[in-house]
Image (cartoon, rainbow, N blue to C red):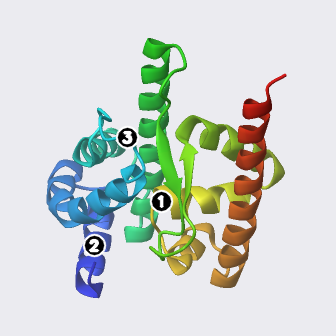
Amino acid sequence: MSQDASGRVTRILLHARDDRAGALAELLPLVHAELRRIAGARMRGERRDHTLEPTALVHEAYVRLVDQDSLQWEDRAQFLAAAAHVMRQVLIGHARARNAKKRGGDRARVTLHDPASETSGEVDVDILDLQEKLEQLHELSERRARVVELRFFGGLTFEETAHVLGIAPKTVEADWYLARTWLRREMKSGRQDEQTGP
């Protein structure tokens, strides 16, 4: 998104507090492409027959975002942070609903990678397993879990994540690499435990 478009999004978000319906109607065309890109990246590792398309994920997330009682976003980064959280909820809810129907079979998978680098080592992970590990990480380090949510589900840059969390970009970068390493180790350990069985 260009600097001009980003500034326009910020102005719309600030006006949304006064004229919610009009501002949000103006906001969707500006953020739709970016939300679609983020949703597409999140769903790249999904099965081909996955029933939730990136466009449906964007629309579901947008509906949930605008359905909130109060809008507290002051800029594009904060809006995308909120969108990241909602997209995570939608994906987890969708995976849980599907698993309830199939009684644990064919769980949803996503790719754990650095959104800033398409060439980084990608790891195919089960979305519910990722959710469980993120909850464990949250117990160890709430900030690192939040960094993963913003970077992985929101596609935010180190600078945008730092802005949302009120910390230095270098701290975000360190948290991101430590959290990813921890998650990969924990998830690999979980897969090995499943393969060896009790």
The residue pinned by badge 1 equals 81
Task: Please provide percent x and percent y for residue 58.
Answer: 28, 48
Q: Is residue 59 above or below residue 44?
A: above
Q: In front: 124, or 65?
A: 124
Q: Is residue 4 above or below residue 72?
A: below
Task: Assign a secondary structure to mark 1.
Answer: helix
The residue pinned by badge 2 equals 11
Q: Residue at x 28, y 65 (%)?
A: 34
Q: Going from the N terminus, do you reach mark 3 or mark 2 first?
A: 2
Q: In front: 123, or 91?
A: 123
Contact between marks 3 and 1 (CB within 8 A): the answer is: no
The residue pinned by badge 3 equals 47
Amino acid at circle 2: Arg
Quarter of the picture containing the N terminus is: bottom left
Amino acid at circle 3: Arg
User: Residue 61 vs residue 114: left or right?
Assistant: left
Q: In front: 79, or 187?
A: 187
Q: Is residue 43 visible?
A: yes
Q: Residue furthest front?
A: 196
Task: Assign a secondary structure to mark 2.
Answer: helix
Q: Going from the N terminus, do you reach mark 3 or mark 1 first?
A: 3
Task: Please provide percent x and percent y for residue 20.
Answer: 24, 51
Q: Going from the N terminus, do you reach mark 1 or mark 2 first?
A: 2
Dot 2 crowding, Cα within 10 Å, few <14, some 14–19, many 20+ = some
Dot 3 crowding, Cα within 10 Å, few <14, some 14–19, many 20+ = few
Q: Residue at x 15, y 61 (%)?
A: 29
User: Residue 69 vs residue 96: left or right?
Assistant: left
Q: CA distance from mark 1 to mark 2?
A: 17 Å
Contact between marks 1 and 2 (CB within 8 A): the answer is: no
Amino acid at circle 1: Ala
